[in-house]
């Protein structure tokens, strides 16, 4: 795992030199850091290989039925853009950012994903109503894993 002091130094150098993206690779890991529009650095993710899927384990197999048993016809998935830990709320005493029945817009924060001690706000990027929350609070998530199903408006 990358040393947090090194990471902070890299972010400082990015800001000082007005860099928007930085890729680091060594023998053990690959890390990509991107700066957001407001000058705030955002950790994208250490890149990892996804485990192989078993043959016939498609998520949409079964005529619109997803692997979690929900009828996904017409629903849009909000997927994790990184590997990390899923948090439904900003802290344990706060209400969840999004739950079943919550109306979201493209800029609505629906959860946080912690990656390497950096908390990243995940936005809906779609307008609609949350129909299903697919991940439990505090659970590890993978890149591309479906987090929510939204019925678009």
Image (cartoon, helix red, strand yellow):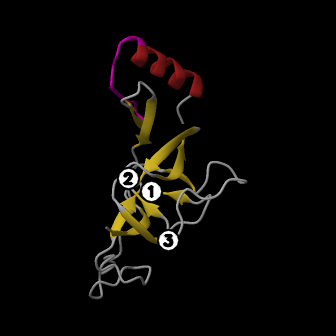
User: Of discs 1 and 2, which sits in the foreground?
Assistant: 1
Q: Residue furthest top?
A: 16
Pointers 3 and 1 in contact (CB under 8 A)?
A: no
Query: Closer to the N terminus: mark 3 or mark 1?
Result: 3
Query: Closer to the N terminus: mark 3 or mark 2?
Result: 2
Residue 54: x and y in percent read 35, 75
Q: Quadrant of residue 149?
A: bottom left
User: Of discs 3 and 1, which sits in the foreground?
Assistant: 3
Q: Identify the image quadrant of the N terminus.
A: top right
Q: Residue furthest right?
A: 93
Q: Which of these two is toward me, 2 or 83?
A: 83
Which residue is the site of mark 2?
A: 49
Residue 24: x and y in percent read 38, 28
In the displayed structure, 86 sits above or below 77; it is above
Q: Identify the image quadrant of the C terminus.
A: bottom left
Mark 3 element type: loop
Q: What whole-number distance in Å separates the C-alpha atoms at marks 3 and 1?
A: 25 Å
Instruction: Tell me if residue 123 can be seen.
Output: yes
The residue located at (64%, 58%) in the rendering is 95
Q: Quadrant of residue 131?
A: bottom left
Which residue is the site of mark 1?
A: 142
The residue located at (52%, 49%) in the rendering is 113
Q: Is residue 17 magenta?
A: yes
Query: Closer to the N terminus: mark 1 or mark 2?
Result: 2
In the displayed structure, 106 sits above or below 116; it is below
Which residue is the site of mark 3?
A: 101
| Magenta segment boundaries in residue numbering | 16-28
Q: Is residue 91 magenta?
A: no
The residue located at (41%, 24%) in the rendering is 39
């Amino acid at each position: 795992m990358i040393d947090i002091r090194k990471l902070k130094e890299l972010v400082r150098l990015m800001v000082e030199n007005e860099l928007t993206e930085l890729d680091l690779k060594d023998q053990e890991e690959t890390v990509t850091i991107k700066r957001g529009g407001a000058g705030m650095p955002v950790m994208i993710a250490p890149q990892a290989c996804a485990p192989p899927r078993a043959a016939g384990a498609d998520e949409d197999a079964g005529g619109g039925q997803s692997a979690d048993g929900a009828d996904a016809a017409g629903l849009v998935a909000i997927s994790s853009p990184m590997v990390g830990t899923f948090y439904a709320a900003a802290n344990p005493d706060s209400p969840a950012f999004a739950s079943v029945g919550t109306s979201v817009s493209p800029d609505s924060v629906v959860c946080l994903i912690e990656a390497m001690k950096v908390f990243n706000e995940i936005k809906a990027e779609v307008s609609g109503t949350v129909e299903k929350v697919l991940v439990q609070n505090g659970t590890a998530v993978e890149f591309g894993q479906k987090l929510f199903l939204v019925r678009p408006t």
